[in-house]
Amino acid sequence: MGPRIGKLAFTMGLIILLLGILVLPFLPLTSGEFVVDVMAICTISIFLLLLTWYIRRQSKKSDEKSNNSKG
């Protein structure tokens, strides 16, 4: 994954997460919208965690390759 795509995906995920958290206090607890909002927050949080893990893994592999080629 290119750095621009990773940054775009992370930014979009962060915006969706913040918007979901922003409207959460204004939703009634018994409404369907509340359930869907909580599900969206959980899903996007998992997405952001996986994306962060993937980017860090790719970065570590890139660092190892550059260190191996130098030494």
Image (cartoon, helix red, strand yellow):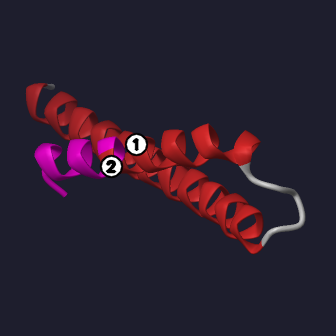
For the residue pair 57 and 32, the one nearer the viewer reads as 32
The Cα–Cα distance between marks 1 and 2, rounded to whole angstroms, is: 5 Å
Do labels 1 and 2 touch, CB within 8 Å?
A: yes
Residue at the location (29% across, 52% down)? 9
Q: Residue at x 62, y 45 (%)?
A: 23
Which residue is drawn at the image coordinates 19% and 58% (left, top)?
A: 1
Using the rendered view, name the quadrant where residue 67 is placed: top left
Identify residue for label 2.
12
From the top left corner, tell me how far across and down residue 48 is, in percent. 49, 49
- Residue 7 inside the magenta-drawn segment: yes
Identify which amino acid the numbered label 1 is placed on.
Ile
Task: Check residue 50 in the rendering and tell me which mark sits there, or answer none.
Answer: none
Question: Residue 43, image x and y in percent?
Answer: 60, 63
Please report the bounds of the magenta region as a residue range: 1-11
Where residue 16 appears, as percent x and y from the top left, is: 45, 50
10 Å crowding of disc 1: few (<14), some (14-19), many (20+): few
Residue 27 located left or right of residue 30: left
Image side of residue 6 versus residue 56, left or right = left
Residue, disc 1: 15
Q: What SS does tag 1 mark?
A: helix
Percent x, y of residue 12: 32, 49
In the foreground, 36 or 7: 36
**Residue 42 vertical position relative to residue 14 in the rendered view, above or below:** below
